[in-house]
């Protein structure tokens, strides 16, 4: 089931099943405690991020071909970083190029896992029981900060608007993450075109591994890594500029599109 979080025509926050024509069939209840189907249909005034994540974990170099395009070895264990929760925006909101580092902002199309119930030291076999669902994420990254200026990834990955998330959540009972296409397009041109079958560490492995390092709270987002084709690895490099339109596509979920504006 697809679950959208949105504002209706009265600016009231709602949950519902998205329908054609920017409408949704309302759902009753709580995203984490349980939802019941309703019958009322309303207009979607504006999409919101599918969740308010208490934490956002990213996984670096988790596609074999992406590691290869950067000349890096495949990690022996998941390479973990975090993104600021204030970086989250919804589909349709602009990615703002930061005034302090606007020149080398890159796109990263990814499948995101959303945790449904608290996970601490869970096994790989039990990990799927803790997954609420999946969504699309763009792990926007300032490459100059990441590679030359800072020596670590916090600022590069955490600027405001650097985590577009959405457009909605697809529940775990209706989605198999094992082999789905993950793509990015900039101004309609295909940049990344991979599949989750190229993942070094699959979704249950990531949930289990992270849960042995941290307590994963409901709503936690795990960005599972990006396939080859990112901007910095292209010849010449392709970085985001004001006026660009970036789309992340994940098979079985949908399309997450955001414009780019100057800071």
Image (tube, grey):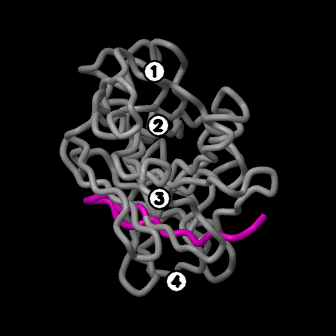
Residue plotted at (56% across, 57% down): 164
Number of residues whose C-alpha sits closer than 10 Å to that of mark 3, classed few (under 14), some (14–19) or many (20 or more): few
Q: Which residue is mark 1?
A: 210
Would you say the residues marked 1 and 3 are in contact, meaning their CB atoms lie under 8 Å apart? no
Q: Which residue is mark 3?
A: 236
Image point (61%, 35%), residue name: 147
* Disc 4 from disc 1: Cα separation: 38 Å
Residue that badge 4 annotates: 43
Q: Is residue 187 above or below residue 158?
A: below
Secondary structure state at the residue bearing disc 4: strand
Distance between mark 3 and mark 2 Cα atoms: 30 Å
Q: Nearer the viewer, residue 246 or 249?
A: 246
Q: Tell me where the magenta segment starts and ends, as one range.
A: 248-263
Q: Secondary structure at mark 3?
A: loop
Instruction: Decide if residue 1 is in sight here.
Output: no
Residue 50 in the image: state x and y as whole percent. Answer: 52, 56
Is the residue marked by circle 1 packed among few (<14), some (14-19), or many (20+) residues within 10 Å?
A: many
Determine contact: label 3, label 2, CB under 8 Å.
no
Question: In which quadrant of the rendered image does the N terminus lie?
Answer: bottom left
Query: Which numbered marker is on residue 28?
Result: none
Q: Residue at x 47, y 58 (%)?
A: 236
């Amino acid at each position: 089931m697809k679950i959208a979080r949105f504002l209706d025509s009265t600016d009231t926050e709602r949950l519902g099943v998205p329908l054609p024509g920017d409408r949704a069939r309302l759902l009753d209840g709580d995203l984490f405690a349980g939802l019941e189907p309703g019958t009322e249909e309303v207009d979607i005034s504006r999409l919101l991020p599918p969740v308010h994540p208490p934490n956002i974990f990213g996984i670096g170099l988790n596609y074999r071909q992406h590691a290869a395009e950067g000349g890096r070895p495949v990690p022996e264990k998941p390479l973990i970083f975090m993104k600021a929760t204030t970086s989250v925006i919804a589909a349709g909101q602009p990615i703002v190029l930061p005034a302090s580092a606007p020149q080398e902002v890159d796109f990263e199309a990814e499948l995101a896992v959303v945790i449904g119930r608290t996970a601490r030291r869970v096994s790989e076999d039990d990990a799927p029981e803790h997954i609420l669902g999946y969504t699309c994420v763009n792990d926007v990254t300032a490459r100059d900060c990441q590679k030359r200026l800072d020596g670590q990834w916090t600022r590069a990955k955490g600027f405001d608007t650097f985590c577009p998330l959405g457009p909605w959540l697809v529940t775990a009972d209706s989605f198999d993450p094992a082999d789905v296409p993950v793509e990015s397009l900039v101004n309609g041109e295909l940049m990344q075109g991979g599949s989750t079958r190229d993942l070094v560490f699959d979704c249950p492995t990531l949930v289990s591994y992270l849960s042995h390092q941290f307590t994963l709270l409901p709503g936690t987002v795990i960005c599972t890594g990006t396939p080859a084709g990112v901007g910095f690895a292209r010849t010449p490099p392709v970085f985001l500029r004001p006026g660009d339109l970036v789309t992340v596509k994940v098979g079985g979920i949908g399309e997450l599109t955001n414009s780019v504006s100057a800071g």
